[in-house]
Amino acid sequence: MDPIYKQLVDQNDQLAAAALEKQVLDPASKYYGGVIDETGIARASHHSTPVYIAAWAAALVNPDSRYYRDPALAASLDMAADFMLNRQHADGTVSLGSTNYHSPPDTGFVIGGVAQIYQLLARQEWADVQPAAAKLKLFLERTIPAMLSGGCHTPNHRWVITAALAMLHEIFPQPELKERAEAWLAEGLDITADGEWTERSNGIYNAVSDLALYHTARVWGRPELLDSVRRNLRMMVYLIHPSGEVVTDYSGRQDFGQTYNMATYYTIYRLMAAYDQDPVFAAMGDYAGTFLKGPDGVNNNGLLHMLLYPETEAAVRELPRAELPDSYVRILNLSHPVQEHLSLIDAVGHHMHIQHSSMHLAFGAPVVRIREQAQSVTIMPRTPSFFSLRHGDARLLGVKLSTSFSPGIVKFDELTAEDHVYRLDATLSKGYNGPIPQQHLPLTSQGPVSPWYLLPHQHRPMTHLQTLELQAEITRGASEWKIRVQSDQREDVFAQLTFILGSEGELEGSGLENAGDGKYFLKSGSAVYTAGIDRIEISDGAYEHLLPGVREDAHPAGCTYVHVNLMTPFDRTFTVRLL
Protein backbone atom coordinates (compact mmCIF):
# COMPACT_ATOMS: atom_id res chain seq x y z
CA MET A 1 0.00 0.00 0.00
CA ASP A 2 1.28 3.47 -0.90
CA PRO A 3 2.53 5.03 2.38
CA ILE A 4 0.97 8.44 1.73
CA TYR A 5 -2.35 6.80 0.88
CA LYS A 6 -2.20 4.75 4.09
CA GLN A 7 -1.36 7.91 6.04
CA LEU A 8 -4.34 9.72 4.54
CA VAL A 9 -6.70 6.83 5.30
CA ASP A 10 -5.53 6.67 8.91
CA GLN A 11 -5.79 10.44 9.36
CA ASN A 12 -9.23 10.45 7.76
CA ASP A 13 -10.49 7.72 10.08
CA GLN A 14 -9.21 9.71 13.06
CA LEU A 15 -10.96 12.84 11.79
CA ALA A 16 -14.16 10.91 11.15
CA ALA A 17 -14.12 9.57 14.71
CA ALA A 18 -13.41 12.99 16.22
CA ALA A 19 -16.22 14.57 14.18
CA LEU A 20 -18.75 12.07 15.54
CA GLU A 21 -17.97 13.33 19.04
CA LYS A 22 -18.70 16.91 17.97
CA GLN A 23 -21.85 16.45 15.91
CA VAL A 24 -24.86 18.40 17.20
CA LEU A 25 -27.55 15.83 18.01
CA ASP A 26 -30.19 18.08 19.58
CA PRO A 27 -33.12 18.25 17.09
CA ALA A 28 -34.18 21.58 18.63
CA SER A 29 -30.85 23.22 17.75
CA LYS A 30 -30.52 25.24 14.55
CA TYR A 31 -27.13 23.53 14.20
CA TYR A 32 -28.65 20.03 14.29
CA GLY A 33 -26.51 17.62 12.26
CA GLY A 34 -23.59 20.00 11.95
CA VAL A 35 -20.18 19.50 13.51
CA ILE A 36 -18.89 21.99 16.05
CA ASP A 37 -15.59 23.53 14.97
CA GLU A 38 -12.99 25.69 16.75
CA THR A 39 -15.49 28.58 17.01
CA GLY A 40 -17.78 26.57 19.26
CA ILE A 41 -20.57 26.38 16.69
CA ALA A 42 -21.22 24.37 13.53
CA ARG A 43 -20.87 26.24 10.25
CA ALA A 44 -21.54 25.41 6.61
CA SER A 45 -18.31 27.01 5.36
CA HIS A 46 -15.43 25.22 3.68
CA HIS A 47 -13.26 24.79 6.79
CA SER A 48 -16.12 23.59 8.99
CA THR A 49 -18.87 20.94 8.68
CA PRO A 50 -18.22 20.20 4.97
CA VAL A 51 -14.70 19.07 5.92
CA TYR A 52 -16.22 16.42 8.20
CA ILE A 53 -18.81 15.46 5.60
CA ALA A 54 -15.92 14.76 3.24
CA ALA A 55 -14.17 12.67 5.91
CA TRP A 56 -17.30 10.60 6.55
CA ALA A 57 -18.01 10.11 2.85
CA ALA A 58 -14.42 9.05 2.12
CA ALA A 59 -14.51 6.59 5.02
CA LEU A 60 -17.86 5.07 4.10
CA VAL A 61 -16.93 4.26 0.48
CA ASN A 62 -13.35 3.11 1.09
CA PRO A 63 -12.78 -0.61 1.80
CA ASP A 64 -9.50 0.33 3.50
CA SER A 65 -11.31 2.40 6.15
CA ARG A 66 -12.51 0.97 9.43
CA TYR A 67 -15.80 2.79 8.78
CA TYR A 68 -16.43 1.19 5.39
CA ARG A 69 -20.21 0.93 4.93
CA ASP A 70 -20.88 1.67 8.60
CA PRO A 71 -24.67 2.25 8.92
CA ALA A 72 -24.33 4.48 11.97
CA LEU A 73 -21.83 6.73 10.23
CA ALA A 74 -24.09 6.85 7.16
CA ALA A 75 -26.87 8.13 9.42
CA SER A 76 -24.55 10.85 10.76
CA LEU A 77 -23.66 11.80 7.20
CA ASP A 78 -27.33 12.10 6.34
CA MET A 79 -27.91 14.43 9.31
CA ALA A 80 -24.96 16.55 8.24
CA ALA A 81 -26.42 16.83 4.72
CA ASP A 82 -29.67 18.10 6.32
CA PHE A 83 -27.59 20.64 8.23
CA MET A 84 -26.12 21.97 4.97
CA LEU A 85 -29.59 22.46 3.52
CA ASN A 86 -30.87 24.10 6.70
CA ARG A 87 -27.93 26.52 6.98
CA GLN A 88 -27.98 27.44 3.30
CA HIS A 89 -29.42 30.91 2.80
CA ALA A 90 -32.49 31.45 0.65
CA ASP A 91 -30.29 32.95 -2.08
CA GLY A 92 -28.28 29.72 -2.28
CA THR A 93 -25.17 31.02 -0.54
CA VAL A 94 -23.49 30.15 2.74
CA SER A 95 -21.62 32.49 5.05
CA LEU A 96 -17.98 32.08 6.02
CA GLY A 97 -18.87 33.08 9.56
CA SER A 98 -15.68 34.84 10.61
CA THR A 99 -16.53 37.40 7.91
CA ASN A 100 -18.13 37.31 4.42
CA TYR A 101 -21.86 36.79 4.86
CA HIS A 102 -24.09 35.47 2.06
CA SER A 103 -20.80 35.00 0.25
CA PRO A 104 -20.63 33.77 -3.37
CA PRO A 105 -16.86 33.04 -3.24
CA ASP A 106 -17.10 31.14 0.03
CA THR A 107 -20.00 29.23 -1.43
CA GLY A 108 -17.70 28.50 -4.37
CA PHE A 109 -15.13 26.97 -2.04
CA VAL A 110 -17.84 24.72 -0.58
CA ILE A 111 -19.09 23.72 -4.02
CA GLY A 112 -15.54 22.71 -4.96
CA GLY A 113 -15.65 20.03 -2.27
CA VAL A 114 -19.33 19.11 -2.05
CA ALA A 115 -19.52 18.48 -5.81
CA GLN A 116 -16.75 15.90 -5.44
CA ILE A 117 -18.43 14.36 -2.38
CA TYR A 118 -21.70 14.06 -4.30
CA GLN A 119 -19.98 12.49 -7.31
CA LEU A 120 -18.20 9.99 -5.07
CA LEU A 121 -21.40 9.00 -3.24
CA ALA A 122 -23.59 8.92 -6.34
CA ARG A 123 -21.44 6.24 -7.97
CA GLN A 124 -21.78 3.90 -4.95
CA GLU A 125 -24.06 0.88 -5.13
CA TRP A 126 -24.66 0.97 -1.36
CA ALA A 127 -28.17 2.36 -0.76
CA ASP A 128 -27.43 3.80 2.70
CA VAL A 129 -25.46 6.76 1.29
CA GLN A 130 -27.89 7.71 -1.46
CA PRO A 131 -30.22 9.87 0.72
CA ALA A 132 -27.25 12.03 1.72
CA ALA A 133 -26.09 12.16 -1.89
CA ALA A 134 -29.52 13.41 -2.98
CA LYS A 135 -29.50 16.13 -0.32
CA LEU A 136 -26.01 17.29 -1.29
CA LYS A 137 -27.12 17.42 -4.92
CA LEU A 138 -30.04 19.62 -3.87
CA PHE A 139 -27.65 21.84 -1.95
CA LEU A 140 -25.53 22.22 -5.09
CA GLU A 141 -28.55 22.93 -7.28
CA ARG A 142 -29.66 25.69 -4.92
CA THR A 143 -26.27 27.42 -5.31
CA ILE A 144 -26.68 27.95 -9.05
CA PRO A 145 -28.47 31.33 -8.91
CA ALA A 146 -25.76 32.73 -6.63
CA MET A 147 -22.98 31.41 -8.86
CA LEU A 148 -24.65 32.92 -11.92
CA SER A 149 -24.96 36.34 -10.31
CA GLY A 150 -22.41 36.52 -7.50
CA GLY A 151 -19.22 38.52 -7.30
CA CYS A 152 -15.87 38.27 -5.55
CA HIS A 153 -13.51 40.18 -3.27
CA THR A 154 -10.01 39.01 -4.12
CA PRO A 155 -8.19 37.91 -7.30
CA ASN A 156 -8.24 34.21 -6.43
CA HIS A 157 -11.99 34.32 -5.76
CA ARG A 158 -12.56 34.65 -9.51
CA TRP A 159 -10.98 31.28 -10.16
CA VAL A 160 -12.71 29.67 -7.17
CA ILE A 161 -16.06 30.79 -8.60
CA THR A 162 -15.05 29.70 -12.09
CA ALA A 163 -14.14 26.24 -10.83
CA ALA A 164 -17.43 26.05 -8.91
CA LEU A 165 -19.31 26.89 -12.10
CA ALA A 166 -17.39 24.17 -13.94
CA MET A 167 -18.06 21.54 -11.30
CA LEU A 168 -21.73 22.47 -11.17
CA HIS A 169 -21.81 22.16 -14.97
CA GLU A 170 -20.57 18.56 -14.66
CA ILE A 171 -23.69 17.76 -12.65
CA PHE A 172 -26.18 20.26 -14.08
CA PRO A 173 -25.15 20.93 -17.71
CA GLN A 174 -26.77 24.34 -18.02
CA PRO A 175 -25.18 26.61 -20.67
CA GLU A 176 -25.53 29.65 -18.40
CA LEU A 177 -22.94 28.18 -16.03
CA LYS A 178 -20.33 28.09 -18.75
CA GLU A 179 -21.24 31.56 -19.96
CA ARG A 180 -20.73 32.99 -16.47
CA ALA A 181 -17.37 31.23 -16.18
CA GLU A 182 -16.28 32.67 -19.51
CA ALA A 183 -17.11 36.15 -18.23
CA TRP A 184 -14.65 35.66 -15.36
CA LEU A 185 -12.00 34.05 -17.56
CA ALA A 186 -12.27 36.94 -20.03
CA GLU A 187 -10.53 39.14 -17.43
CA GLY A 188 -7.32 37.22 -18.15
CA LEU A 189 -5.07 35.31 -15.78
CA ASP A 190 -3.08 37.34 -13.26
CA ILE A 191 0.26 35.54 -13.23
CA THR A 192 3.80 36.46 -14.19
CA ALA A 193 5.98 34.52 -16.62
CA ASP A 194 7.84 33.07 -13.65
CA GLY A 195 4.64 31.82 -12.00
CA GLU A 196 3.65 34.38 -9.38
CA TRP A 197 -0.03 35.11 -8.80
CA THR A 198 -1.25 38.61 -7.88
CA GLU A 199 -1.60 37.89 -4.18
CA ARG A 200 1.93 36.42 -3.89
CA SER A 201 0.51 34.05 -1.30
CA ASN A 202 2.81 31.04 -1.23
CA GLY A 203 1.26 29.79 2.00
CA ILE A 204 -2.42 29.82 1.01
CA TYR A 205 -3.77 31.21 -2.24
CA ASN A 206 -1.30 29.88 -4.81
CA ALA A 207 -2.64 26.39 -4.23
CA VAL A 208 -6.21 27.70 -4.25
CA SER A 209 -5.83 29.26 -7.69
CA ASP A 210 -3.87 26.30 -9.05
CA LEU A 211 -6.44 23.72 -7.99
CA ALA A 212 -9.38 25.84 -9.14
CA LEU A 213 -7.96 26.33 -12.63
CA TYR A 214 -7.07 22.64 -12.87
CA HIS A 215 -10.71 21.68 -12.41
CA THR A 216 -11.88 24.40 -14.79
CA ALA A 217 -9.50 23.10 -17.43
CA ARG A 218 -10.48 19.49 -16.74
CA VAL A 219 -14.22 19.99 -17.04
CA TRP A 220 -14.23 22.17 -20.14
CA GLY A 221 -11.19 20.86 -21.96
CA ARG A 222 -9.17 24.07 -21.59
CA PRO A 223 -5.55 22.85 -21.36
CA GLU A 224 -4.21 26.38 -21.94
CA LEU A 225 -5.36 27.25 -18.40
CA LEU A 226 -2.92 24.69 -17.04
CA ASP A 227 0.08 26.69 -18.24
CA SER A 228 -0.44 29.09 -15.33
CA VAL A 229 -0.78 26.21 -12.88
CA ARG A 230 2.38 24.65 -14.25
CA ARG A 231 4.35 27.89 -13.93
CA ASN A 232 3.32 28.41 -10.32
CA LEU A 233 4.15 24.84 -9.34
CA ARG A 234 7.59 25.16 -10.93
CA MET A 235 8.17 28.44 -9.10
CA MET A 236 7.34 26.86 -5.76
CA VAL A 237 10.26 24.44 -6.08
CA TYR A 238 12.44 27.45 -5.19
CA LEU A 239 10.31 28.92 -2.42
CA ILE A 240 10.84 26.42 0.37
CA HIS A 241 13.22 26.75 3.28
CA PRO A 242 15.29 23.68 4.30
CA SER A 243 12.85 22.91 7.12
CA GLY A 244 9.95 22.69 4.68
CA GLU A 245 8.65 26.10 5.71
CA VAL A 246 7.22 28.03 2.76
CA VAL A 247 8.59 31.50 1.98
CA THR A 248 5.88 33.94 3.10
CA ASP A 249 8.10 36.97 3.68
CA TYR A 250 6.49 39.00 0.88
CA SER A 251 2.92 37.70 0.75
CA GLY A 252 0.11 40.11 -0.01
CA ARG A 253 -2.36 38.15 2.12
CA GLN A 254 -2.83 36.84 5.66
CA ASP A 255 -0.02 34.29 5.38
CA PHE A 256 2.48 37.19 5.34
CA GLY A 257 5.27 36.35 7.76
CA GLN A 258 3.41 33.33 9.13
CA THR A 259 4.61 29.71 9.17
CA TYR A 260 3.18 27.42 6.49
CA ASN A 261 4.39 24.21 4.91
CA MET A 262 3.75 22.53 1.56
CA ALA A 263 0.81 20.35 2.63
CA THR A 264 -1.81 22.36 0.71
CA TYR A 265 0.07 21.71 -2.54
CA TYR A 266 -0.12 17.93 -2.24
CA THR A 267 -3.27 17.43 -4.32
CA ILE A 268 -2.43 19.78 -7.16
CA TYR A 269 1.11 18.42 -7.51
CA ARG A 270 -0.28 14.88 -7.74
CA LEU A 271 -2.91 15.86 -10.29
CA MET A 272 -0.45 17.78 -12.46
CA ALA A 273 2.22 15.08 -12.13
CA ALA A 274 -0.24 12.61 -13.64
CA TYR A 275 -1.41 15.05 -16.32
CA ASP A 276 2.10 16.10 -17.41
CA GLN A 277 3.90 12.86 -16.51
CA ASP A 278 6.35 15.16 -14.74
CA PRO A 279 8.97 13.67 -12.35
CA VAL A 280 9.53 17.05 -10.64
CA PHE A 281 5.84 17.41 -9.85
CA ALA A 282 5.74 13.81 -8.65
CA ALA A 283 8.68 14.45 -6.31
CA MET A 284 7.12 17.68 -5.05
CA GLY A 285 3.87 15.83 -4.41
CA ASP A 286 5.73 13.26 -2.33
CA TYR A 287 7.50 16.04 -0.44
CA ALA A 288 4.23 17.91 0.20
CA GLY A 289 2.72 14.65 1.41
CA THR A 290 5.24 14.42 4.25
CA PHE A 291 3.59 17.46 5.84
CA LEU A 292 -0.01 16.26 5.67
CA LYS A 293 -1.68 16.32 9.09
CA GLY A 294 -5.27 16.42 7.89
CA PRO A 295 -7.34 17.94 5.10
CA ASP A 296 -7.25 21.59 4.13
CA GLY A 297 -10.59 23.12 3.18
CA VAL A 298 -13.19 20.76 1.77
CA ASN A 299 -12.20 21.78 -1.77
CA ASN A 300 -8.64 20.50 -1.23
CA ASN A 301 -8.93 17.02 0.29
CA GLY A 302 -6.17 14.67 -0.80
CA LEU A 303 -7.98 11.44 0.02
CA LEU A 304 -11.17 12.60 -1.67
CA HIS A 305 -9.22 13.23 -4.88
CA MET A 306 -7.53 9.83 -4.64
CA LEU A 307 -10.87 8.04 -4.35
CA LEU A 308 -12.57 10.12 -7.03
CA TYR A 309 -9.74 9.95 -9.57
CA PRO A 310 -8.07 6.53 -9.05
CA GLU A 311 -6.63 6.55 -12.56
CA THR A 312 -4.66 9.68 -11.67
CA GLU A 313 -3.20 8.02 -8.61
CA ALA A 314 -2.18 4.97 -10.62
CA ALA A 315 -0.38 7.20 -13.13
CA VAL A 316 1.53 9.07 -10.40
CA ARG A 317 2.72 5.90 -8.70
CA GLU A 318 4.38 4.75 -11.93
CA LEU A 319 6.33 7.96 -12.46
CA PRO A 320 10.06 8.30 -11.73
CA ARG A 321 10.98 10.98 -9.20
CA ALA A 322 13.32 13.89 -9.91
CA GLU A 323 15.89 15.01 -7.37
CA LEU A 324 14.75 18.31 -5.86
CA PRO A 325 17.33 21.11 -5.74
CA ASP A 326 18.87 22.25 -2.45
CA SER A 327 21.53 24.57 -3.87
CA TYR A 328 20.63 27.38 -6.26
CA VAL A 329 20.38 31.11 -6.96
CA ARG A 330 17.07 32.00 -8.53
CA ILE A 331 15.75 35.48 -9.36
CA LEU A 332 12.02 35.56 -10.06
CA ASN A 333 10.25 38.24 -12.08
CA LEU A 334 13.43 40.12 -12.93
CA SER A 335 12.09 41.00 -16.39
CA HIS A 336 8.48 41.52 -15.36
CA PRO A 337 7.36 45.02 -16.50
CA VAL A 338 6.31 46.30 -13.07
CA GLN A 339 6.94 49.98 -13.77
CA GLU A 340 5.27 49.77 -17.18
CA HIS A 341 2.12 48.31 -15.63
CA LEU A 342 2.11 50.79 -12.73
CA SER A 343 2.38 53.69 -15.19
CA LEU A 344 -0.95 52.66 -16.70
CA ILE A 345 -2.91 52.91 -13.45
CA ASP A 346 -4.08 56.50 -13.80
CA ALA A 347 -5.56 55.80 -17.23
CA VAL A 348 -7.69 52.95 -15.88
CA GLY A 349 -9.82 55.37 -13.87
CA HIS A 350 -10.37 53.55 -10.57
CA HIS A 351 -8.26 56.15 -8.70
CA MET A 352 -6.70 53.38 -6.61
CA HIS A 353 -10.00 52.51 -4.96
CA ILE A 354 -11.53 49.03 -4.90
CA GLN A 355 -14.19 47.80 -2.50
CA HIS A 356 -13.25 45.10 0.04
CA SER A 357 -9.91 44.23 -1.57
CA SER A 358 -6.41 45.48 -2.35
CA MET A 359 -4.68 46.71 -5.49
CA HIS A 360 -1.67 44.45 -4.79
CA LEU A 361 0.82 46.90 -6.27
CA ALA A 362 3.75 44.63 -5.38
CA PHE A 363 2.61 42.07 -7.96
CA GLY A 364 5.48 41.05 -10.21
CA ALA A 365 8.22 42.59 -8.08
CA PRO A 366 11.47 40.60 -8.28
CA VAL A 367 12.38 38.06 -5.63
CA VAL A 368 15.85 36.61 -5.09
CA ARG A 369 15.97 33.09 -3.69
CA ILE A 370 19.25 31.56 -2.60
CA ARG A 371 19.64 28.06 -1.15
CA GLU A 372 22.84 26.45 -0.04
CA GLN A 373 21.64 23.30 1.70
CA ALA A 374 20.73 24.45 5.26
CA GLN A 375 21.08 28.14 4.37
CA SER A 376 18.10 29.87 2.77
CA VAL A 377 17.95 33.57 1.83
CA THR A 378 15.25 35.78 0.36
CA ILE A 379 15.87 39.32 -0.94
CA MET A 380 12.87 41.36 -2.05
CA PRO A 381 11.77 44.93 -2.85
CA ARG A 382 8.28 46.39 -2.37
CA THR A 383 7.83 44.64 0.98
CA PRO A 384 8.25 45.71 4.63
CA SER A 385 11.26 43.39 4.99
CA PHE A 386 13.93 43.38 2.30
CA PHE A 387 16.11 40.48 3.54
CA SER A 388 15.49 37.22 5.39
CA LEU A 389 17.68 34.25 6.20
CA ARG A 390 17.41 30.75 7.59
CA HIS A 391 20.56 29.14 8.95
CA GLY A 392 19.48 25.71 10.12
CA ASP A 393 17.22 26.32 13.12
CA ALA A 394 18.26 29.98 13.42
CA ARG A 395 15.68 32.21 11.75
CA LEU A 396 16.34 35.80 10.76
CA LEU A 397 12.75 36.43 9.73
CA GLY A 398 13.40 39.82 8.21
CA VAL A 399 15.39 43.05 8.07
CA LYS A 400 13.51 46.31 7.64
CA LEU A 401 14.39 49.99 7.51
CA SER A 402 12.06 52.68 8.85
CA THR A 403 12.37 56.46 8.77
CA SER A 404 10.56 59.49 10.13
CA PHE A 405 10.54 61.05 6.67
CA SER A 406 7.35 59.52 5.30
CA PRO A 407 7.08 58.18 8.12
CA GLY A 408 7.14 54.41 8.46
CA ILE A 409 8.69 51.35 6.83
CA VAL A 410 10.70 51.85 3.65
CA LYS A 411 9.60 49.64 0.79
CA PHE A 412 12.43 49.64 -1.72
CA ASP A 413 11.23 50.10 -5.29
CA GLU A 414 13.95 48.58 -7.43
CA LEU A 415 16.29 45.58 -7.30
CA THR A 416 19.40 45.02 -9.38
CA ALA A 417 21.76 42.03 -9.17
CA GLU A 418 25.37 41.61 -10.25
CA ASP A 419 28.15 39.26 -9.08
CA HIS A 420 26.52 38.21 -5.78
CA VAL A 421 25.69 41.84 -4.97
CA TYR A 422 22.04 42.84 -4.73
CA ARG A 423 21.08 46.51 -4.60
CA LEU A 424 17.71 47.92 -3.60
CA ASP A 425 16.76 51.57 -4.12
CA ALA A 426 13.97 53.83 -2.91
CA THR A 427 13.17 57.50 -3.33
CA LEU A 428 10.74 58.84 -0.74
CA SER A 429 8.90 62.07 -1.41
CA LYS A 430 6.76 64.27 0.76
CA GLY A 431 5.38 67.73 0.08
CA TYR A 432 2.71 70.15 1.20
CA ASN A 433 -0.72 70.96 -0.22
CA GLY A 434 -1.49 74.50 -1.32
CA PRO A 435 -4.93 76.18 -1.44
CA ILE A 436 -7.47 74.86 -3.91
CA PRO A 437 -7.81 77.23 -6.92
CA GLN A 438 -10.98 79.28 -6.81
CA GLN A 439 -12.50 77.74 -9.91
CA HIS A 440 -12.47 74.27 -8.31
CA LEU A 441 -14.09 75.20 -4.99
CA PRO A 442 -17.54 73.70 -4.34
CA LEU A 443 -20.60 75.72 -3.30
CA THR A 444 -20.26 74.35 0.23
CA SER A 445 -17.07 76.38 0.65
CA GLN A 446 -19.25 79.54 0.60
CA GLY A 447 -21.76 78.20 3.11
CA PRO A 448 -21.91 78.52 6.89
CA VAL A 449 -19.71 75.42 7.22
CA SER A 450 -17.24 73.95 4.74
CA PRO A 451 -16.56 70.26 5.51
CA TRP A 452 -13.01 69.14 4.79
CA TYR A 453 -14.25 65.96 3.13
CA LEU A 454 -16.27 67.93 0.56
CA LEU A 455 -13.26 69.81 -0.75
CA PRO A 456 -11.69 68.60 -4.04
CA HIS A 457 -8.25 67.90 -2.60
CA GLN A 458 -7.02 66.50 -5.92
CA HIS A 459 -6.72 70.07 -7.20
CA ARG A 460 -4.36 71.28 -4.47
CA PRO A 461 -0.96 72.26 -5.92
CA MET A 462 2.08 70.63 -4.34
CA THR A 463 4.56 72.93 -2.58
CA HIS A 464 8.00 72.40 -1.05
CA LEU A 465 8.32 68.86 -2.32
CA GLN A 466 11.11 67.02 -0.46
CA THR A 467 12.84 63.74 -1.32
CA LEU A 468 15.00 61.22 0.51
CA GLU A 469 17.02 58.65 -1.42
CA LEU A 470 17.89 55.37 0.27
CA GLN A 471 19.78 52.27 -0.78
CA ALA A 472 20.42 48.83 0.65
CA GLU A 473 23.25 46.78 -0.79
CA ILE A 474 23.48 43.10 0.11
CA THR A 475 26.65 41.17 -0.57
CA ARG A 476 27.10 37.43 -0.22
CA GLY A 477 30.27 36.08 1.37
CA ALA A 478 31.51 32.59 2.18
CA SER A 479 29.86 32.46 5.62
CA GLU A 480 28.40 35.92 6.03
CA TRP A 481 26.17 38.54 4.46
CA LYS A 482 27.03 42.25 4.35
CA ILE A 483 24.09 44.67 4.49
CA ARG A 484 25.08 48.23 3.62
CA VAL A 485 22.41 50.92 4.10
CA GLN A 486 22.91 54.43 2.74
CA SER A 487 20.99 57.67 2.67
CA ASP A 488 21.52 60.82 0.67
CA GLN A 489 22.92 63.92 2.39
CA ARG A 490 19.64 65.11 3.93
CA GLU A 491 20.23 65.75 7.61
CA ASP A 492 18.46 64.73 10.79
CA VAL A 493 15.96 62.15 9.57
CA PHE A 494 15.42 59.55 12.30
CA ALA A 495 15.90 55.99 11.05
CA GLN A 496 15.81 52.54 12.54
CA LEU A 497 17.15 49.31 11.07
CA THR A 498 15.42 46.29 12.61
CA PHE A 499 16.51 42.65 12.60
CA ILE A 500 13.51 40.38 13.22
CA LEU A 501 14.35 37.01 14.78
CA GLY A 502 12.34 33.96 15.77
CA SER A 503 11.20 34.08 19.38
CA GLU A 504 12.35 30.49 19.97
CA GLY A 505 16.05 31.44 20.10
CA GLU A 506 18.31 33.09 22.68
CA LEU A 507 19.94 36.49 22.20
CA GLU A 508 23.08 37.74 23.91
CA GLY A 509 25.62 40.50 23.47
CA SER A 510 27.39 43.11 25.60
CA GLY A 511 26.00 46.00 23.54
CA LEU A 512 22.39 44.85 23.85
CA GLU A 513 19.79 46.71 25.89
CA ASN A 514 16.56 44.87 26.67
CA ALA A 515 13.60 47.18 25.99
CA GLY A 516 10.94 44.61 26.98
CA ASP A 517 8.30 42.74 24.98
CA GLY A 518 10.94 41.00 22.88
CA LYS A 519 12.60 44.25 21.77
CA TYR A 520 16.31 45.04 22.10
CA PHE A 521 18.59 47.88 21.08
CA LEU A 522 22.00 46.95 19.72
CA LYS A 523 23.84 50.07 20.84
CA SER A 524 27.33 48.82 19.98
CA GLY A 525 29.30 45.73 19.14
CA SER A 526 27.57 42.53 18.13
CA ALA A 527 24.71 40.27 19.18
CA VAL A 528 24.57 36.49 18.81
CA TYR A 529 21.28 34.69 18.25
CA THR A 530 21.20 30.95 19.00
CA ALA A 531 18.53 28.39 18.10
CA GLY A 532 19.38 24.76 18.63
CA ILE A 533 22.95 24.23 17.45
CA ASP A 534 22.81 27.11 14.94
CA ARG A 535 23.94 30.68 15.59
CA ILE A 536 23.81 34.04 13.79
CA GLU A 537 25.95 37.02 14.74
CA ILE A 538 24.76 40.56 13.92
CA SER A 539 27.21 43.44 14.01
CA ASP A 540 27.84 46.38 14.49
CA GLY A 541 25.37 48.27 16.65
CA ALA A 542 24.59 52.00 16.76
CA TYR A 543 22.42 54.25 18.93
CA GLU A 544 22.39 57.68 17.30
CA HIS A 545 19.01 58.77 18.69
CA LEU A 546 16.83 57.78 21.65
CA LEU A 547 13.49 57.07 19.95
CA PRO A 548 12.10 53.63 20.87
CA GLY A 549 10.53 53.34 17.45
CA VAL A 550 9.58 55.21 14.31
CA ARG A 551 6.02 56.44 13.84
CA GLU A 552 3.74 54.10 11.86
CA ASP A 553 6.16 51.17 12.13
CA ALA A 554 4.31 48.47 14.05
CA HIS A 555 6.01 45.34 15.35
CA PRO A 556 3.73 42.27 15.54
CA ALA A 557 3.96 40.14 18.66
CA GLY A 558 5.67 36.78 18.71
CA CYS A 559 9.13 37.74 17.44
CA THR A 560 12.41 39.07 18.80
CA TYR A 561 13.43 42.49 17.51
CA VAL A 562 16.93 43.99 17.44
CA HIS A 563 16.89 47.72 16.64
CA VAL A 564 19.77 49.86 15.46
CA ASN A 565 19.08 53.62 15.66
CA LEU A 566 20.52 55.79 12.88
CA MET A 567 20.41 59.44 11.82
CA THR A 568 20.79 60.70 8.27
CA PRO A 569 23.06 61.08 6.52
CA PHE A 570 24.32 57.54 7.05
CA ASP A 571 26.42 54.95 5.25
CA ARG A 572 26.68 51.91 7.49
CA THR A 573 27.54 48.28 6.81
CA PHE A 574 26.20 45.49 9.01
CA THR A 575 27.37 41.90 8.99
CA VAL A 576 25.18 38.83 9.44
CA ARG A 577 27.67 36.04 10.15
CA LEU A 578 26.71 32.36 10.17
CA LEU A 579 28.37 30.55 13.07
Image (cartoon, rainbow, N blue to C red):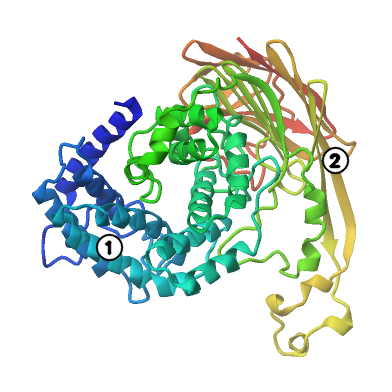
Tell me the SS state at disc 1: helix
Q: Quadrant of residue 257?
A: top right
Residue 224 left/right relative to 475: left
- For the point 61% across and 29% down, the residue is 238
The foreground one among 393 and 242 is 242
Q: Is residue 92 above or below residue 39?
A: below
The foreground one among 214 and 460 is 214
Residue kind at label 2, given as amino acid type: Glu
Q: Nearer the viewer, mark 2 or mark 1?
A: 1
Residue 370 left/right relative to 156: right
Label for residue 111? none
Q: Earlier in the sequence, mark 2 or mark 1?
A: 1
The foreground one among 406 and 411 is 411
Mark 2–mark 1 distance (CA, rounded to whole Å): 60 Å
Number of residues whose C-alpha sits closer than 10 Å to that of mark 2, classed few (under 14), some (14–19) or many (20 or more):
some
Residue at the spot of label 2: 469
Quadrant containing the N terminus is top left
- For the point 42% across and 57% down, the residue is 109
- For the point 78% across and 85% down, the residue is 442
Residue 499 percent coordinates (x, y): 63, 28
Residue kind at label 1, given as amino acid type: Leu
Residue at the spot of label 1: 136
Residue 177 percent coordinates (x, y): 48, 70
Residue 465 left/right relative to 518: right
Q: Quadrant of residue 189?
A: bottom right
The foreground one among 44 and 221 is 221
Number of residues whose C-alpha sits closer than 10 Å to that of mark 1, classed few (under 14), some (14–19) or many (20 or more):
many
- For the point 34% across and 70% down, the residue is 141
Residue 153 percent coordinates (x, y): 54, 63
Tell me the SS state at disc 2: strand
